[in-house]
Amino acid sequence: MAQRDVVFPAGRQALYERNRYSPAIRSNGFLFVSGQVGSTEDGSPEADLEEQTRRAFNNLKAILAAADCTFDHVVDVTVFMVDPQAKFETIWKVVPEFWGNAPHPTLTAVGVTWLYGFDFEIKVIARLPE
């Protein structure tokens, strides 16, 4: 089996090792980032929805930075939301703080019933800088 080229953000490696997954993998010019939630340093959910969303984006930003990427390198996004009809507007008002200018990446939004105590999760694929 080929060795995976794992990217870890600073300060959270123990959390990923405890939960048995990699935050991101570099492969063939792309960065595949695991779903990021609005967790505090110990992995528990941030209670406030807007702040939980902001933390998810900041956790994602830290992984992108560890791979020398920014949100401008993101080409594909998948978001998961518990009860999107009730929570979409609150979640989506945080997006412009991070997203950057058009053209924007592709996006798939999925409504789910459970995210392990979280209300929002974001996973992305980014093109690695040359």
Image: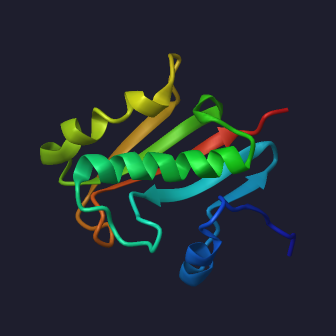
Which residue is the extreme one toward the left? 86
Image quarter (top left, top right, bottom left or bottom right) of the C terminus: top right
Figure check: 56 above or below 100: below
Image quarter (top left, top right, bottom left or bottom right) of the N terminus: bottom right
Q: Residue 10 at x, y = what percent?
A: 66, 60
Q: How many marks?
A: 0
Figure check: 68 above or below 106: below
Q: Residue 65 at x, y = what percent?
A: 67, 44
Report whether 120 appears left or right of 26: left
Residue depicted at 41% across the width and 30% down the height: 97
Residue depicted at 69% across the width and 39% down the height: 69
Which residue is the extreme one toward the top? 102
Report whether 104 appears left or right of 62: left
Figure check: 105 above or below 6: above
Residue depicted at 34% across the width and 48% down the height: 53
Report whether 2 appears left or right of 18: right
Q: Residue 86 at x, y = what percent?
A: 12, 46
Residue depicted at 61% across the width and 77% down the height: 14
